[in-house]
Image (cartoon, helix red, strand yellow):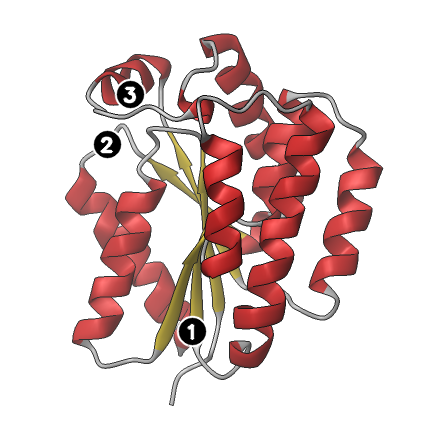
Amino acid sequence: MYKKSLIVFEGIEGSGKTLHSNYLANYLKKKKIKFLKLREPGGNVNSEKIRKLLLSNRSKFHKKTDLLLYCAARNENIENQIKKNFRKKIIIIDRFVDSTLAYQHYGMNINYQFIKLINKYLLNNIKIDLTFLNLVNYKNLKKRLSKRKNLNRYDKFNISFYKKVQKGYITIAKKNKNKYKIIDSNKDIFKNRELIIESVTKLLK
């Protein structure tokens, strides 16, 4: 038997979080271990509709509207996906509650306690077991974004914004050392994969 843990991958654009979360999902699939994989925003029909609104280059929402839309998409995942699978399957999420603190508080200066209050209300008794924070230097960030064919609204902020967000993530990680694992995405991808699998294997035992 293995623990039915909730594992989150966090990080700014170009940090490799999606790449690593997909790799973990494929690893569990090969091992025939049941899991649920979600992304934020998105993850189910309604959340994907909100994702299109949020990330569309045509959208020009106020920062508080962005916050509430992200939380609305999260709530759809929690109510329709996470609650019924929590502690029944391993759950992998590409971005979750800490991304809202990193982007909307540290990046956009929305009140910290307000964001914490919304997240606490939405999550209720749902707890995260392990978060992989993927860090990237700004040279690699620009290089990786330049290779993307289609850039969404959140791919187009200036470097100073991403710096604030990544520093915010690091601050969050320092407050939650026992449940955070730092992945240096500037290093060899295969070594990072080994580190992730090693950490997850230890968690699930």
Between circles 2 and 1, the one closer to the viewer is 1
Q: Secondary structure at mark 2?
A: loop
The location of residue 38, given as percent across then percent down, is 43, 59
Q: In which quadrant of the rendered image does the C terminus lie?
A: bottom left
| Marks 3 & 2, CB-CB < 8 Å contact | no
User: Which mark, residue 50?
Assistant: none
The x, y position of residue 194, in whole percent, is: 22, 54
Check the picture and name the quadrant holding the N terminus: bottom left
Which SS class for mark 3?
helix
Q: Where is residue 167 shown, x and y percent of the image?
A: 56, 24
Sequence-wise first label, 3 or 1? 1
Left or right of 183, for residue 169: right
Q: Which mark is residue 145?
A: 3
Q: Earlier in the sequence, mark 3 or mark 2?
A: 3
The tag earlier along the polypeptide, 2 or 1, is 1
Instruction: Tell me which corner region of the image, top left, top right, bottom left or bottom right, holds residue 67.
Output: top right
Q: Nearer the viewer, mark 3 or mark 1?
A: 3
Dot 1, how many residues are within 10 Å of its Cα: few (below 14), some (14-19), or many (20+)? many
Q: Is residue 201 left or right of residue 57?
A: left
The tag on residue 90 is 1
Question: Which residue appears at 73% of the width and 21% of the height?
Answer: 109
The front one of 177 and 94 is 94
- Mark 3 → mark 1, Cα distance in angstroms: 30 Å
Kindly identify the residue that appears in the image at 33 percent across and 69 percent down. 201
Viewer-side residue, 29 vs 147: 147
Q: Residues within 10 Å of mark 2 (few under 14, many from 20)?
A: few
Distance from label 2 to label 1 (Cα)?
A: 27 Å
Give the image quarter of residue 144: top left
The type of residue carrying mark 1 is: Ile
Q: Which mark is residue 187?
A: 2
